[in-house]
Amino acid sequence: MRLRPDAVGGIQKFHDDILTWRRAHSRPRFAMPKRLIRDDGKAALGTMLIRLHMYQSTADGLVCREYYEELSSVEGTSREPTPYPGKHSDAIAESIFENGAELVQDPDFGSLADEIDLADVEEPFLQAALISKDTEERIHRLVQALGLRRLNDADRRKCFTVAISLLSLGFPETWSKDVGHQKQQWSRCEQYLPHVNALVQHGRENNSLAENPDVWAELLLRCSWYLYEKEQYTYARTFTQTALRNFTSQETLAYASAIDLLGLIDLDLNNPLQALSSFETGFSVRRSLLAPTDPLIAFALNNLALVRTELAELSEAEQLHQQAIQLRLQNNSDRIGNSYSNYAVALLRMGKPNEAERILMSCPSLQGCTDETFLQVDNPRFVGDMVLLSRIRHAQGRKGDALRLASKALAWRQKVHGDRYKTCDSMYDVAFLLREQGQTATALDLLDALTRIAGALEAGEGHMARAEWKTSQILEAMGRSDDSRTHLEKAEALRKAFRTNAGDGITNESDWERLTPYMLW
């Protein structure tokens, strides 16, 4: 092949750049984990990438233009789906390396824990324009792909394991102790989540398995609890199921935690029978591993009580709640408020609102509580208590207080959760209460917005069907029979398509209410 003079002159430059890159590539302590933890970096690497391509093929000018076109078609796109469609990073924050370095046991990556060594390792990458740096590291995906292709299976497994160690600090550990909502950790979790997703993708594409499958499963489980709290149930379930497949033993606390998480997901999606099966399995595992008075036994009993309440098996629920409360009091647990509020839900469903209020207000954190106290704590669980108190007030006939509490809870949930299940649940509560106070137009607007939101959610049909039914009832009372019939037909169609514990016979309002969970925390 005859090359033009400008192409011949560029060959030496290509060669020099490749040598620089290869010298950097030979420093695996820093390079390899960054190739495994994806970022959508937008650094100015176009020229270098073209040189890499051309050095391996031809220096012809036409091919050069083709590679520019190839690069432009890749830039800004994503090869894989992300599990959480919220904010995600365009780069790897240096803090991920700094914070996680203490967990990395491999001596080949020792420079991560030393600021001077780290800077020394970065230098050839920066000179070769393979990374750009401010407070984050950016590596183009094509460079990462090239680096991954050069790794053998053993190196892939090693790098995969190191990346897991780096990311483990991004999510709370949930299986060795009884913990509640971790909202204070959400921003940190969100920073780490895209990189966990990248590991999932790399594992699928390259058959890269961690040297210790249990460590990989535990990272997925940590991430799954965060996704569950964010009501990203589809992704939480997928990650949890993947974790369960990677655990080497079914007789560990982490395995029990994963099984329980599947149960909680099913509970929120109104599949209580499936949830019951998961909770019973989780309880069985914990009972075989722990003392009868361990706080995690109380956690398992609490879950069983929750699902019995959803199944309206209220006598069994009450007994389980009382056992959990006794254990938590015995252990002086800071989770006693969780038991009291859950027990209050069962009492309310038993038709005992005054007793439910007494138990709810036994929560130490609710002593002297006001509306603002509920909201200022910035905890989803406390806002759930506000929803519960609103329903108690309604059952007591204090409808103005009920609407005030429900409206504030809705505003908080819209702000924090966005268009998710708990927001839909609160929208229905507020619409119901507005209708009772004669604010029909506003109630209909809320129900219409609810159906549009629920229509975009996995298993949102129950929320949609209930809202369509309530809309039908309101329109019928207004004398708009044709419109009422249209909405009732929609509600019936949605109900038949949605699997619930309601069965086929829906004859009254309580049957329609069973299309959604009795309580969403």
Image: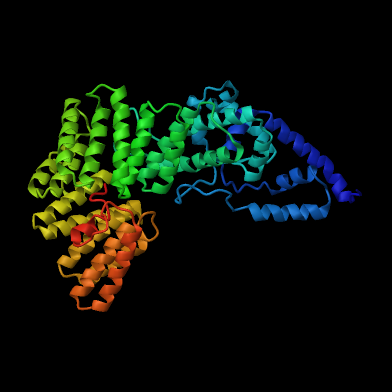
Q: Which residue appears at 61% of the width and 42% of the height? A: 139
User: Front-most of 494 and 399?
Assistant: 494
User: Front-most of 233 and 110?
Assistant: 233
Q: Residue 223, located in which quarter of the rendered image?
A: top left
Horizontal side of residue 302 vs 43, given as left or right: left
Horizontal side of residue 169 vs 325, given as left or right: right
Q: Which residue occupies the extreme right position in the image?
A: 2
Tell me: residue 173, above or below residue 348.
above
Horizontal and vertical percent position of residue 355: 8, 44
Horizontal and vertical percent position of residue 490: 32, 68
Tell me: residue 201, above or below residue 438.
above
Q: Is residue 50 visible?
A: yes
Q: Which residue appears at 50% of the width and 42% of the height? A: 197
Q: How many marks?
A: 0
Horizontal and vertical percent position of residue 59: 83, 48
Q: Is residue 92 visible?
A: no
Colour logic: rainbow
User: Front-most of 298 and 2?
Assistant: 298
Horizontal and vertical percent position of residue 2: 92, 49
Q: Which residue occupies the extreme front position in the image?
A: 504
Horizontal side of residue 41 vs 64, given as left or right: left
Q: Which residue appears at 31% of the width and 42% of the height? A: 275
